[in-house]
Image (spheres, rainbow, N blue to C red):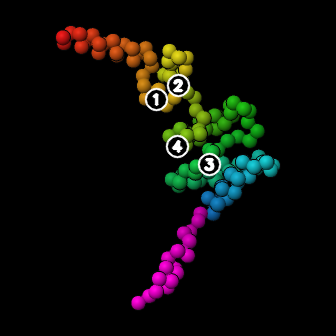
Amino acid sequence: MKTFKQFSEGFFSKKSEEDPAETELADLGMKAAGKSGWSKKEQERYNDLWLTLHKKGKTPAMPPPAVHGDDSWGTKTKKLHKKLRLTVKDHPNVMEKVDWEAYDTPYGGRHGKEFDKRLPWKKEKDKYEKSKSLKKQKK
């Protein structure tokens, strides 16, 4: 009979094989978040690694590909995301065009996640009035 030490010796010490692309992406992600220099070449390498992992089905939690030296509005990055066909379903940080008419509310814009599933306020109001009139007819 094996002792606990002999039994558990190989069980906990086994390391799962790490993908070299994942480790390199993690290193580049830490460098991007730090104060050290970030070159265009490193940005391209980060984008390539992120996309290879995404295509494998292991979408990284780190920010999606971007354009080096983009302005604060992310105009070039939005074009890149559209070109790569990335959506918010792929990663929550993907920048895509929002149809603000769909989020029209009486408060002047989008207010929280509860409005994501709702209809525009005019349609909600019409729906409410119809249901109210149906209730009156039943009485």
Sequence-wise, the earlier of marks 2 and 4 is: 4
Residue wearing tag 2: 111
Q: Position of residue 136 (x, y in %)?
A: 23, 10
The disc labelled 1 sits on which kind of residue?
Glu
| Label 1 vs 3, first from the N-terminus | 3
- Upstream in the sequence, badge 1 or badge 4? 4
Question: Residue 104: x percent and y percent?
Answer: 50, 18
Please state the extent of the stretch shown in magenta in the rendering: 1-19
Residue at the spot of label 4? 90
Question: Which of the marked residues, 4 or 3, is nearer the chain's N terminus?
Answer: 3
**In the displayed image of the protein, which residue is found farthest to the left?**
139
Q: Is residue 135 left or right of residue 5?
A: left
Q: Residues within 10 Å of mark 4 (few under 14, many from 20)?
A: few
Question: For numbered disc 4, what is the local secondary structure?
Answer: loop
Relative placement, left or right, of 53 versus 69 is left
- CB atoms at circles 2 and 1 under 8 Å apart? yes
Q: CA distance from mark 2 to mark 1?
A: 8 Å
